[in-house]
Image: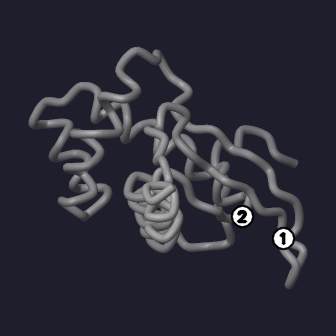
């Protein structure tokens, strides 16, 4: 039974689970969207949202708490400079999980987890097409 079990253990020890979630959170902050298993995405969402809440407060203590958990100063800098200001007007619910279906190899349920307010990256047209349109 699942009475009062608040988190998924992901079949790992506490230290391994903490490291896994820290690394997933760093990847999510760095790339804006990651593809992982559904269980890991569901376990990552509360962690990522707490990091964004720390980034929104923006003070030194929050920055030190984020560095203590994530252990990567460059990622924390991006969290406080780009990710948190994009979610400043949102009161919560910073992450979105999109189910993708089963993985081909082992049929594990896969999902995308992404920030709702992530800036959209526009892809540039290849140089060959740009030159062709300029000549015409």
Q: Is residue 122 visible?
A: yes
Based on the displayed image, in which of its 4 quarters is residue 53 positioned? Answer: top left
In this picture, is 93 found above or below 79? above
- Which x, y percent locates residue 7? 64, 48
- How far, Cα to Cα, is label 2 from label 1? 7 Å
Query: Which residue is at the far bottom?
Result: 105
Local packing at callout 1 (Cα closer than 10 Å; few below 14, some 14-19, many 20+) is some
Q: Which mark is residue 108?
A: 1
Q: Residue at x 44, y 68 (%)?
A: 127
Q: Is mark 2 on a helix, strand or loop?
A: strand
Helix, strand or loop status at disc 1: loop
Report the residue that reaches farthest toward the left: 60
| In this view, 61 is above or below 14 | above
Q: In this view, does 134 lie above or below 63?
A: below
**Decide: marks 2, 1 in contact (CB < 8 A)?**
yes
**Residue carrying label 2:** 37
Q: Is residue 67 shown left or right of residue 49?
A: left
- Residue 56 lies left or right of residue 3; in this view the side is left
């Amino acid at each position: 039974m699942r009475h009062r079990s608040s988190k998924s253990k992901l079949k790992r020890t506490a230290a391994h689970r903490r490291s896994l979630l820290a690394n997933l959170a760093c990847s999510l902050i760095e790339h804006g969207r990651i593809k992982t298993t559904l269980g890991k995405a569901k376990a990552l969402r509360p962690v990522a949202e707490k990091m964004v809440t720390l980034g929104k407060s923006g003070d030194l203590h929050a920055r030190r708490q984020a560095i203590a958990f994530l252990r990567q100063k460059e990622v924390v800098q991006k969290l406080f400079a780009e990710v948190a200001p994009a979610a400043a007007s949102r009161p919560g619910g910073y992450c979105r999980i999109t189910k993708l279906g089963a993985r081909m190899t082992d049929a594990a349920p896969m999902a995308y987890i992404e920030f709702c307010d992530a800036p959209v990256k526009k892809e540039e047209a290849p140089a060959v097409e740009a030159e062709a349109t300029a000549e015409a």
